[in-house]
Image: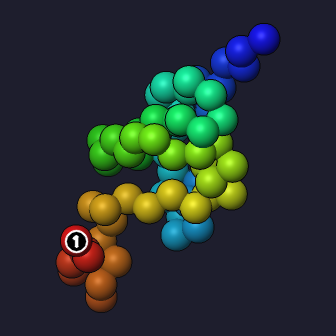
């Protein structure tokens, strides 16, 4: 039986909120951050733990971002 996890909302370790928009299996999850950034091919375990990073997150002195 395939679980339907689409729509589940989580918080990253740096406090950003994101939502699951595609769930293929526990090793292939697509998420979308509130700012519209989409991240592909993450594991469900990392999603649950908040170990997901948004490359557009302003993290350097509130001014810039890495990448």
In the picture of the structure, the residue carrying the numbered disc 1 is 67
Question: Residue 5: in sight, yes or no?
Answer: yes
Q: Residue at x 45, y 41 (%)?
A: 41
Question: Residue 62: in sight, yes or no?
Answer: no
Q: Residue at x 69, y 49 (%)?
A: 45
15 left or right of 26? left
Q: Nearer the viewer, residue 18 or 55?
A: 55
36 left or right of 32? left
The answer to whether 19 is drawn above or below residue 4 in the figure is below
Q: Nearer the viewer, residue 37 or 1?
A: 1
Residue at the top extreme? 1
Alpha-carbon neighbours of circle 1 within 10 Å: few (<14), some, or many (≥20)?
Answer: few
Q: Quadrant of residue 56?
A: bottom left
Tag count: 1
The answer to whether 6 is drawn above or below residue 28 in the figure is above
Q: Quadrant of residue 13?
A: bottom right
In terms of secondary structure, where does tag 1 sit?
Answer: loop
Percent x, y for residue 50?
61, 58
């Amino acid at each position: 039986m395939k679980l339907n996890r689409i729509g589940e909302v989580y918080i990253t370790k740096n406090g950003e909120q994101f939502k699951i928009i595609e769930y293929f299996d526990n090793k292939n999850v697509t998420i979308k951050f509130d700012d519209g950034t989409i991240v592909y091919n993450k594991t469900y375990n990392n999603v649950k733990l908040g170990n997901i990073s948004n490359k557009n997150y302003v993290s350097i002195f509130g001014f810039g971002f890495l990448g």
